Image (tube, rainbow, N blue to C red):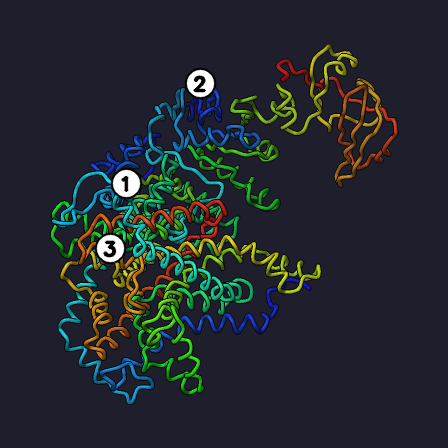
Amino acid sequence: MRSDGNASAPLGLKIAAGAGLAFLHLPILLIFLYAFTTEEKSYQFPPPGYTLKWLSVAWSRPDVWDALWLSVRVASISTAVALVLGTLCAAAVSRTKFFGRETISLLVILPIALPGIITGIALRSAFSFVEIPFSFWTIVLGHATFCVVVVYNNAVARFRRISGSLVEASMDLGADSFQTFRHVILPNIGTALLAGGMLAFALSFDEVIVTTFTAGQQSTLPIWMLEELVRPRQRPVTNVVAMVVVLVTFLPILGAYYLTRDGDQVAGSGK
Amino acid sequence: MTAVLFQQVSRHFGAVRAVDNVDLAIAEGEFFAMLGPSGSGKTTCLRLMAGFEQPTSGHIEIFGETAEGVPPYRRNVNTVFQDYALFPHLSILENVAYGLMVKGVGKIERLKAAEDALAMVKLPGYGARRPGQLSGGQRQRVALARALVNRPRVLLLDEPLGALDLKLREQMQEELKSLQKSLGITFVFVTHDQGEALSMADRIAVFSEGRIQQLGTPEEVYKRPQTRFVADFVGSSNVLPPDFVESLGFGKHHASLRPEAIALGDGPGRKPFSGRVTAASFLGAASRVTVEAAGARVAAMLPASVAVPAQGDTVTLSFLPEDLHIMDGAR
Amino acid sequence: MSIVTDTSILAGRQGPSGRLSDFFWRNPRILLFLMLTPPLTWLGVIYLGSLFALLLQSFFSIDDFSGLINYEFTLATYKQLLIPSNFDIILRTVLMAALVTLASAVIAFPIAYYAARYARGKWKVIFYLGVMLPLWSSYLVKIYAWKLILAKEGILTWLFAKLHLLWLLDAWLSLPVVGGASLSISYTGTFIVFIYVWMPFMILPIQAALERVPGNLIEASADLGGNPAQTFRHVLFPLALPGIIAGSIFTFSLTLGDYIIPQIIGSSRLFIGQAVYAQQGTAGNIPLAAAFSVVPIVIMGLYLWMAKRQGAFDAL
């Protein structure tokens, strides 16, 4: 028997793997079904009837729009901050071997490795200690902290693939550090940064645990949903919002996947 | 005029002396080779010229101007990298025009110059392609064009032919040589292949352990190696031990003798010695025979017309006295 | 041509940017310092600073009468963690995290194994996205989906009814500890949702570990007379173990600190995350909340230390 890669999997394994994937995806598909149910008061299955009415009801709800708008603004600014901080960190770590680079990697990963509630509580007590009132910026502060790692991971992986001689070649041909960054480094890490930025956006757009501690009375879309989950008042509207959130987060994830896939081919063709 | 001048240049990495007290003067218009095994310091010397490394001590001049402390992008010196280092996100034409672009040359002018440079390396019309679409040999030519388009005063080549196959390598050797002649630019190239250095260079510096072992024309280095290392590394000369050399009547010295200077049998004016054949192999154009003679191992290259002696035979070999080179500074 | 110069050292780009570039080239450490200052200020000062300030508070105590924080060093707050009602919370959370990790590994393994060894080309992409999409999709939506599924009038009850198995569901719900009035307010429900939400984090590390196993190793074992169970136990499992440990870091840590899942789907008995939330919020006892949050940090520290010794970080 040889390993030719075409060997067929045992039936049991196929069933187990297929069932595992189905377990991951079926619950999300159910969300789509419930967005069109005519039932308002319970989670009855199967739905007694189907309607498009909740789409327009949700559309005309100002509180949903406000929450969505706040989430988009927070995610955009947090992503921008994370892009700058994550890229700087990745560039510094990959450019030189200096004392403490392991520590820096650990520091970047820490906000996502520790349970979110700890990050949230720590920031909240720090805000109250230095008497910063809750605002848009307190939310951004929390979000940017854990978004850095996503950008950092993507950028570090790409920096590692750019061969060091590309930078030397650029300088050899007369480009100073800034020109080299603009004409060689940036185009080569661009797609990795875009992918990292998209994932950071998805992460921030969805975040609820840290946000509950740093938002005060403000309501991002996940906070709005959390309140509906704890005390359901608008079941049909929540169903529609859940469906929209699924669709909105899928796009950056798919985009990031295609970007890094193609990007790796581009960066790999130098040799 | 001196193109590149090293005065007691050293480059240490921690305790490692990559380049150790090197003195060097490369003349303008010269095709200069730095030859040595990996880790001998030749590549570090090249990087010192390009500006990627700074000397730990010593002084470097390029055409009379002080080079230490000057960043690579301010040196009128260009490099052809071993892995070519073509920019993967740019087309071939943009790659070649890159140096002119960052110096602020207008678009029309720089693209015209890049086209000309591509024509010069026999790749006209390849400008729109991407580096990934070219073969190794073609990428090498692009790297050459990308460097030459800047009209550098010194062109540095880091193992430029290392990644090419034998046939392409021989072809490129000739092309590089004629390109250098027609442009008149000083070429400095690094190689570990002695054949490449011998066939292309005007002068060769043989490196070992961060130092220059010998500096001279290919003929000098090949025929009169000054140290055992050079004799060994360049042309795989026989290094004869002092006792053996004394027994032949040349005094108690190390000496080198090239395999092809040795013939089977004796003749007028030749020095004979005899030995037992320990290995013999037919190589096509010649046969290589190794003989054990009075405590010395001697390799001889015999023409294919001569019958190959069998292993274990005792044979008489001879050479002309002037082909034996006494090494004074043998190490 | 105008570009030909006969100096060997070029004048270079004029202006401040050229001079700045020269300066950074001569002083690379200053550039490094400038690059690291913003991220290190943010993460090292703001984030770590807040974290340390929080941990510091766990050594203070709260005055029972005034409800104000008493800023004197004491271990009394930590002692409170050991009183039965609090210690139960810790035990319950750690047990749940361990069970979730174990179950996740069991469910994740076949997916990872299939993806690593049998999926090729298009299927490889489908498996990859099939894991990445649920992993990245909205945490709250996932919980919400399960609220729909586990509700008394929801799809699961309907399914059991269709299969005439409602008696089985009722029997399970009438069991002590794991049961409850309905699945959505039982430990069983909490357990299922924890697995659903954190299991995807287990798949990719296992897959990465398995992909480094040459296929012929498995065939070599079969060739030497090993039956599938023996091959799994002696060849596959030891090789996949670093990946499982790496994945378990996520499932364990994330379960340990979660407070939203048990709040929405589960009984009224608290987990560590909920205790922290309650202590800092309604109870206003920041020192106790801080002491509670030290527990997952210490547990994860120990866990990471053991994982590192097993070489799990190579599989991350």
Q: Residue at x 35, y 32 (%)?
A: B75
Judged from this view, the residue extending furthest toward the top is B251
The answer to whether mark 1 and mark 2 are in CB contact below 8 A is no
Please indicate whether residue C54 sits to the left or right of residue B228 in the image.
Answer: left
The residue lying toward the viewer, choosing from A79 and A119, is A119
**Protein chain holding label 1:** C
Residue topped by disc 1? C35
Is A235 placed above or below B9 here? below
Residue topped by disc 2? B8
Residue A143: image tag: 3
Is A51 placed above or below B275 here? below
Please indicate whether residue C294 sits to the left or right of residue B202 in the image.
Answer: left
Query: Does mark 2 fall on the same chain as mark 3?
Result: no
- In the rendered image, residue C200, in percent from the top left (x then y), is placed at 41, 63
Dot in front, 1 or 2: 1
| Residue count near mark 3 (Cα–Cα under 10 Å), binned few <14, some 14–19, many ≥20 | many
- In what element is the residue under mark 1? helix
The answer to whether mark 3 and mark 2 are in CB contact below 8 A is no
Residue A194 at least partly seen:
no
Q: Which residue is drawn at 28% across and 40% down?
A: C36
**Protein chain holding label 2:** B
The answer to whether mark 1 and mark 3 are in CB contact below 8 A is no
- In what element is the residue under mark 2? strand
- In the rendered image, residue C173, in percent from the top left (x then y), is placed at 38, 75
